Image: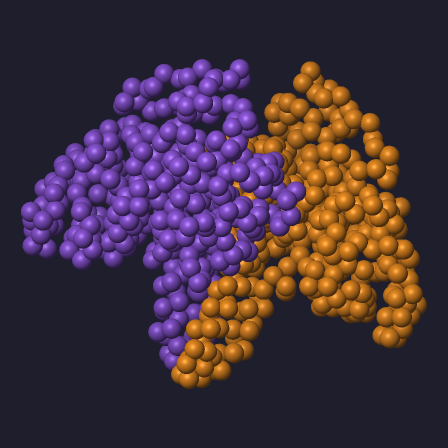
Chain colours: A purple, B orange
Amino acid sequence: MGGDHAPEEIIAGAIDAVAEHDVRVVLVGQAPRIRRELDRHGAIGKIPIVHAEEALDMGEGALASWRKPRSSIAIACHLIRQGRASALVSAGSTAGVVATSRLRLKGQQGVLRPAIAVTLPTRPRPTILLDAGATADVKPEGLVQFAALGTAYAQILLGLERPTVGLLNIGAEPGKGDKVAKRAHELLAGGGHGLEFAGNVEGHDLLAGKVDVIVADGFTGNVALKTMEGTIRTAFAEVRDAMTAGPAARMGALLQRRRLQDLRDRLDPDTYGGGVLLGLNGTVVIAHGASRARAITSACELAHRLAAGRIVERIREQVALTRTSRFGRWTHGERDGTDGRPAEPGDRPAEPAPPADQPEPDRGEPPAAP
Amino acid sequence: MGGDHAPEEIIAGAIDAVAEHDVRVVLVGQAPRIRRELDRHGAIGKIPIVHAEEALDMGEGALASWRKPRSSIAIACHLIRQGRASALVSAGSTAGVVATSRLRLKGQQGVLRPAIAVTLPTRPRPTILLDAGATADVKPEGLVQFAALGTAYAQILLGLERPTVGLLNIGAEPGKGDKVAKRAHELLAGGGHGLEFAGNVEGHDLLAGKVDVIVADGFTGNVALKTMEGTIRTAFAEVRDAMTAGPAARMGALLQRRRLQDLRDRLDPDTYGGGVLLGLNGTVVIAHGASRARAITSACELAHRLAAGRIVERIREQVALTRTSRFGRWTHGERDGTDGRPAEPGDRPAEPAPPADQPEPDRGEPPAAP
């Protein structure tokens, strides 16, 4: 039900994913509307429907996660918890999807905070950037975990055994950065975490394809991603203006139209856009709000691929490597003490689990749209 | 002596600034080399020289500020302190220039931390972004001060009476961001600081020209600026590839060459690049390391304009407005208690001033190159 072109384009995309790519899809939302759309495509009976009374509006943020316990996202999370689905795809409001799935799926064991991974259109192969906005305030240990999350994701998405990881920072040298980045660099450079750390990368390396995974806190990552997207849009608008600003230039533009369109498509966030929320008990693919059928089909394929690659288990293994090796460094439990290590003097007491429909106060912070 | 093309291009640029733009320049550096260059231009006797034995290398960072007390930057700062110069221009290592001038000129009274302001090539008029990397860790009150610094700068540079200020954040709504950005938004939205606060701006607004001044901590600002620069370079490289990838496209490119070159120039950091370090007892213009004569002439003009506009006094007035109005909010003195307000219970004791040639331990942090 989420997205600028929902539910028509969402359903069309799901139908293609089922028909062309062998993905098994369940549609969650207003059953009558979904049935009507399926009927229009002659696909009634080919895709199961689970009814959801409510849906998050595109403008709704984190609050909606508990204001609407029967939203289509909440119901889809429920299917994952019941083991009836392996992953979730939505083109709805990022803040709403993140908050609802954090609340319903919970963070996976051992993971301090979730992160949104996005794929940057670098060459020869894409670069993964995380966090693109799920966790604005993050500790150095959280950044190390993001590196583990990104490594697991890159292993599945890019098929690399040991993807290289760069830390987004403001200088190439180890001593650069704010306090969090400096300390994260120390932890990552210290080794013993099963990661292939390649050092600091800077803003101008984002599209350089120097590393496979770039790690940042959700504030910096979100600003960097949006800056990149905005700059690409501005640059293309300017190029178009420059290319059509006179008869000779216009003629030139005609001769190049197709190639530039291809290039624009490759760099356009509406094409490559969207992210994956990593670190919860289930895979959540957040498609771009402007997604049309093709983008939704890709998102379904991606969700299928991550579920088939057992991303949650991969993350658990990868994070366990960092936690085991850095055991002595974990001086305080940021989560609820269920991470399997013995209690230490500095530990906060375990918090009681909140009732199912109540928000968890310290995790209900509104995340940003990537 | 600093910059990739020093001292030849630096001196050529200075000569033009004197001859064409009526700026009064003193050249600081290796006197024999400078004299030789001046001679080559027939400008001996037209520009005074102050000898400096040493010079910072381009690769040198903050440490050089005390390792070389007689570097050309240190001597130039000395001229400002003596009142023999009003401003300093350098194309040397940003980290070295920032550290040396912080150490020698000191922060101006009432200013918590300095910031580097850069000018983004937006239309119809430029946008000022600060901090581009002088202060990586900043408190919310520091961001409010950056807004005051940027306002004073925009008043002089853009000739605006009340420039609008946006806070770089990860969402448009007030509750978005990390802890520092959220609190800074509260302080700025609270009013009573003499600033024209226009709310949050996001990464994709950097080149949109929505506000006159964009405020960020030095970590985020630096990443955003470099992301923008890197993206512009990548986009143009891709456009060039796309435009020359076939006979028709090559023909098209020929028809457009001039206009695209103009556009590239406008968006190229080597052309518009460089920054101004604000908040010290003297104006410091940091030209791009790749600066050639024309860029140095512009930098000299800018330094002249800022000195003539009394930027240091303007900043003092603007910051005083924010401090006066927000008096109750200043719960701890971040500097050394010399800011003129009465001591409060939470104050740290004033630190003794360090000896002139020693670093100030808590301010010697290496800043990033913008």
Q: Residue at x 84, y 48 (%)?
A: B68
Q: Residue at x 18, y 47 (%)?
A: A24
Q: Is residue A193 above or below residue A164?
A: above
Whole-percent x and y of residue B78? 87, 47
Q: Is residue B272 above or below residue B248?
A: above
Whole-percent x and y of residue B117? 64, 49
Left or right of B303: which side holds B82?
A: right
User: How many numbered dots are placed on residues in this image?
Assistant: 0
Whole-percent x and y of residue A297? 24, 54
Q: Can residue A103 be spotted in the picture?
A: yes
Left or right of B312: which side holds B255?
A: left
Whole-percent x and y of residue A355? 29, 19
Q: Can residue B197 be spotted in the picture?
A: no
Residue A278 location, quadrant = top left
Question: Foreground residue, A145 or A104?
Answer: A145
Q: Residue at x 54, y 69 (%)?
A: B263
Q: Residue at x 44, y 31 (%)?
A: A112
Residue B356 location, quadrant = top right
Left or right of B348: which side holds A108?
A: left
Left or right of B307: which side holds A316?
A: left
Quarter that holds the N terminus of chain B: bottom right
